[in-house]
Structures are given as C-alpha cells and as structure tokens.
Image (cartoon, helix red, strand yellow):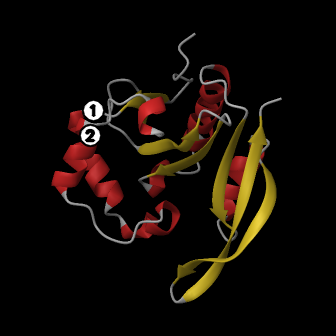
Amino acid sequence: MITLKGDSVYLRALEPNDLEFVYAMENDQSIWEVSNTQTPYSRFLVRQYLENAHQDIYEAKQLRLAICQDEDFPAIGLIDLFEFDPKNNRAGIGIVIQNMDNRNQKVGSEALGLLIKYSFHNLNLHQLYANINVGNVASIALFTKFGFKETGIKKDWILQNNQYQDEAIFQLINK
C-alpha cells in the first residue's frame, strides 16, 4: 500500500516545477481568508520556499503536499499539516482546491482521508485540528464527515469585508 495514493488522488511533495502553481495559489485573493494571508507573495519568495520544502516535518514544523489526480499530472490543490507539535502529538490541517471545477468531486475528501491516515499511522499523531470560518459550510461538512468535532468558537476572530466572523475549531482524536 502506498500511503499517499488513493483511488483518484495522489499526494506528493512539492517540486521546483510547482512554482507557478504555488505562486498562483498564494496570490489568489479569494482564498486569502482561509489561509490567513494579507499580502501578495513574489515568485522569489515562493522559489525560496520551494527550495526549502525538502525540510523534514520535524525540522520545518509543517508539511505541504500537492494534491494531484494522477502521478503525472500537475497539482490541483494543496493540503497542509501546520503547527506540527511532536511533543504533544498534534498538528493543524488545512486544504484548498484551486479550481472551482475540481471542488465537490470528492478530490478534497480523498486527499483529506489520505493525510489523516498518514498523520495517525506514520507520524503517530494523537490529534488533528482545523480552524474553519463558521460560514464555510462546505469545509465544515468535509471535516465532520471524517469525524472532526466542533470543540469551540473563537468569537469575532476573522475580519472579512469589514465585518468580524467567528471561527470554529474542529478536532479529531486518534483513538
């Protein structure tokens, strides 16, 4: 069994030829609210990031993987483990699919399932968590499908369009 390969999705490490894809994702203002981004990234900074993407998760405290529909095809999204905490065996998890046409096709669901399995079986994590805007119904449905439970609300956490939005924290405990 290949841990990061599913029926229709393959998760792989970022490659230097992902520069334009990552650059486009980081500069897509429509997803800045979920990535907590406020300013554009230059190609230079993205190139530097990709040059250091080889760092081990224990060193970098994060893991970003490209979501592909086949090993030979370009990335269609990104899935991350962030704030990796090996002492407490936990990490945050986030996912974004770039093109609206690829959303709602179970691509994100399969990718999330693969990364959950990898996190619990390969990294021996005790828990994963996701921070989701309470209005993001699609993300909430995706994460709760895998057993994530809402454990709290951060009131007025995100300023979006001059209005404060609540953010929920969802946790999945590996039992």
Which one is in front, 43 or 113?
43
* Number of other residues with Cα within 10 Å of mark 1, as a class: few under 14, some 14 to 19, many 20 or more: few
Tag on residue 50? 2
The alpha-carbon separation of the residues under discs 1 and 2 comes to: 7 Å
Residue 79 is at least partly visible in this image: yes
**Disc 2 element:** helix
Q: Are marks 1 and 2 in contact (CB under 8 Å)?
A: yes
Callout in the foreground (1, 2):
2
- The answer to which image quadrant residue 158 occupies is bottom right
Which of pointers 1 and 2 lies earlier in the amino acid sequence? Answer: 1
Give the image location of residue 165, x and y in percent: 64, 79
Residue 63 is at least partly visible in this image: no
Relative to 130, residue 75 above or below: above
Which one is in front, 78 or 42?
42
**Disc 1 element:** loop
Residue 10 left/right relative to 137: left
Furthest residue in direction top, as rendered: 1
Residue type at tag 1: Glu
Give the residue pinned by disc 1.
15
Residue 53 left/right relative to 143: left
Which one is in front, 170 or 102?
170
Residue visible at 83% across and 29% down?
175
The N terminus - image quarter: top right
- The answer to which image quadrant residue 93 occupies is top right
Residue visible at 32% across and 29% down?
54
Relative to 103, residue 42 above or below: below
Residue type at tag 2: Leu
